[in-house]
Amino acid sequence: MQATRLAGHAAAMPSLVPAPAHRIVEQPDCVTAGPVGRLLHRTANPGRFLKFGARLQPLLTWPAIVLAAIGLGWGLFLSPADWQQGDAVRIMYVHVPAAWLASLGYVALAACGLLSLVWRHRLADLAAAEIGPVGACVTGLCLASGSLWGRPTWGAWWVWDARLTSVLVLFFLYLGHVALMRAFDDPARGARAAAILALAGAVDLPVIKFSVQWWNTLHQPDSITLTGAPTMSPSMLWPLLITAVGFSLGFAALVTARLRAAILEARLRGLLLAGAADAGHA
Amino acid sequence: MTRRSRRLWLVAGCMASFGTATGLALAAFSSNIVFFMAPSQLLAAPPPAGRTIRLGGMVVAGSLVRTRIAGREPSVRFEVTDGRQAIVVGYVGILPDLFREGQSVVALGEMAPDGSFRAAEVLAKHDETYMPKDVADALRKSGRWDPRFGPPPPEASWDGMGAAGPAAPEHLRS
């Protein structure tokens, strides 16, 4: 059992151990790849990502901590209370960045799924495995903070309107992805199933985005849109945007740190397996 | 066609058909996905008696009547409108803090035989406008907005209102 698991992990990391047969069959793909394919294959190298990630990590982590601290401090303590919601509006400074990241994280997950299924991008499966739990956490944070916000303003912890329900579906998609990724002894099969789920689940993203326009909901429409002027006082908008940038960088920092750890872990497993194989031959 | 582009077309085709299927399903269930019905919809197609439904709309200014009898829960009557027609809503219980005339509300309940709506639960639906109290006060004092008659003017016109923008004229400050 342990041996199959190790072998499976090694198969996910073909640069570390002799490639199994099914990997070799796919080699022509790399040879015939166009410019996009060649770029993808250059970035797919886990070793190169380790070097890149080590330099990237402090550039993500420190700005994330500083911006989130500034944004949250400004939003939670200094910004004005809303004229009708009072101080309850401050939940927005956590809820809205979490909600944006929940969708954005799933976009990243679906992109990894596409890279994995079509280009057999080696790093994409590892990245998807690390984005999933972080995305599930921010979606959980979005649902929990929204529930806390709904009680004092709407008068209900939860309603089954289109916006809330579609975000709950997103939360279950994340949980399903996390579970599916780890459900097989052979991680390559888990990654494939999870990639299909990630792509299929992407239909939920437009439903979340437009739910407040397509159907009448208890949830209010978006205050900040790409096309229109924000319906929010600048004294509230700035802390919200700063917090959102801080949270986004924090999300990227967490995923990068997890991905680096996962690559090192897989590399270690590969070395252990190679060592065990040598010991077996001797 | 390489294996890679074949896979790309396969994934694109699956995504397109799955997306279309989801879109059609949502369109088919659209009338069930809406969270509430507007008064004019409700009056145009009255639901069967005893059927629990949600009524949504704006509380008509001046329509709110509160009745308090000692020892009993407070009861209220108010009209809900979608701008075309209005329905009288009766409710016994505690209203959410954001309930006021001019606010959007969603009431869960059923139609009474007299044509009014008997609510078992009332939720407040606030809009997507967020503004500090002094801006709201300034807008009201300047006479450009009355919260009882609908949403506030757009954010771009708040300039000079309250502490958020440039200093407001002294006579608009509270």
Image (cartoon, coloured by chain):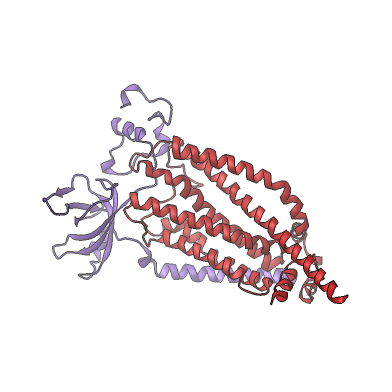
Chain colours: A red, B purple
The residue positioned 26% from the left and 42% from the top of the image is B148
- Looking at the picture, tell me which residue is in the foreground, A3 or A77: A3
The quadrant in which the N terminus of chain A is found is bottom right
Q: Residue A201: image x %, image y %?
A: 54, 66
Looking at the image, which residue sits at the far right? A282
In the image, residue A234 sits, relative to residue A34, either above or below, namely: above
Residue A264 lies left or right of residue A131; in this view the side is right
Looking at the image, which residue sits at the far top? B170
Q: Residue B107: image x %, image y %?
A: 26, 58
Quadrant of the image occupied by residue A49: bottom right
In this figure, what is the number of numbered marks?
Answer: 0
The residue positioned 29% from the left and 34% from the top of the image is B140
- Looking at the picture, tell me which residue is in the foreground, A175 or B14: A175
Q: Residue B63: image x %, image y %?
A: 18, 48
The quadrant in which the C terminus of chain A is found is bottom right
Q: Residue B60: image x %, image y %?
A: 22, 48
The residue positioned 44% from the left and 52% from the top of the image is A145
In the image, residue B162 sits, relative to residue A122, either above or below, namely: above
Residue A64 lies left or right of residue A214; in this view the side is right
Quadrant of the image occupied by residue A230: top left
Q: Can residue A70 be spotted in the picture?
A: yes
- Looking at the picture, tell me which residue is in the foreground, B9 or B161: B161
